[in-house]
Image (spheres, helix red, strand yellow):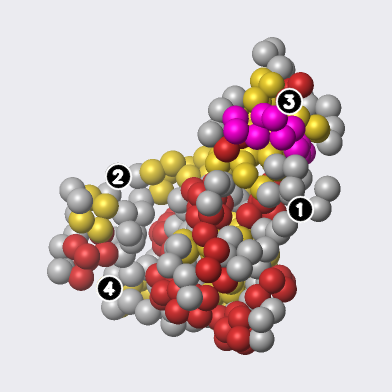
Amino acid sequence: MAINFFMTVNNMNGIINIYKEKGYTSHDVVAKLRGILKTKKIGHTGTLDPDATGVLPVCIGNATSLCDLLTDKIKIYDAEILFGLATDTEDISGVVMKNCPVDFTEEDLKNRLKDFIGNIQQVPPMYSAIKVNGKKLYELAREGIEVERKPRPVEIYEIILKSVTKENDKVKEARITVKCGKGTYIRSLCRDIGESLGSCACMKSLERCTSGIFDKECAVKLDEVERLFKEGKIEDILLPTEYFFKNDGSFVIKDEFKRFLLNGNKIFAADVVINKDPLDGNLFKAYTSDGEFKAVYSFDINTGVFSPYKMFLQ
């Protein structure tokens, strides 16, 4: 079966693993890509602050249906913490709110980092896109309004202390790698680490190294996207929508039942040609006989029926 991965420019579908550079907002990246690729249906999969760099998968065309799934995935960050300084934005770009004494060792820091691994409660920063009464927190912050933020549950799987900078044997800066789940603010993590050590802290730099199945080694900058598009080689970096489900199975709907797939109906196992024996809850990419990817279905072993999980009918 020949599978048609790529489309014409006017009907472009897929994912581009962007390396966001410093100075751009995530919205800036989307806006620039709309201009470069001459298409409007584009969405990103997890906001990065303007000063942050790193992996920002961008979904195009029917792949925008994946944005919520991609946002939910595990992410890995490299961050630098500056101790002894607190700012209103919780990073180095903000207005300094206070200076604090720093009186802890590298061993103290190592021991304290263990307290932040697992399911923890985190108060989000005022400079964030979280909405309170219909208004984003950063909009309120810019008006000089600070509101109470309730702690939110986040999950941190791992924190690795990569290096430290010392002064008189006391830690002044630290570089950490953080593996975490959805909704974790690394700025706030840096803040909380500093406070837990009897000091204060802000984030000096941040790079997102991994977002789900996407990593920085395979990410491309905006100027590279523009060059490839002008050369007619955008397919070199445009991953097909179904790439996100690359580890799942697939089936081809028999022609006489194609209408059920195109209408998003349930499908019986006997109505498809499948590439592996399905287990309960397995996801399967659904193709027409001419190789067009249309949906992802989940399998119910008790009924022998595939049910739609995500539709990509554009």
Marks 3 and 4 sit apart, C-alpha to C-alpha, by 65 Å
User: Measured from the top left, where is residue 156 in percent x and y?
Assistant: 56, 48
User: Measured from the top left, where is residue 78 in percent x and y?
Assistant: 60, 68
Marks 2 and 4 sit apart, C-alpha to C-alpha, by 21 Å
Left or right of residue 139: residue 54 = right
Eye-nearest disc, 1 or 2? 1
Of labels 1 and 3, earlier in sequence is 1
Do labels 1 and 3 touch, CB within 8 Å? no
Residue 11 versus residue 163 in the image, above or below: above
- Find residue 150 and name its label: 2
- Find residue 3 and name its label: 1
Question: Residue drawn at (22%, 65%), measured in percent from left and top?
Answer: 139
Would you call the spot at circle 2 few (<14 residues within 10 Å), some (14-19), or many (20 or more)?
A: few
- Circle 4 SS class: strand
Of labels 1 and 2, earlier in sequence is 1
The span picked out in magenta is 249-260
Q: Amino acid at mark 4?
A: Met
Residue 94 versus residue 6 in the image, above or below: below
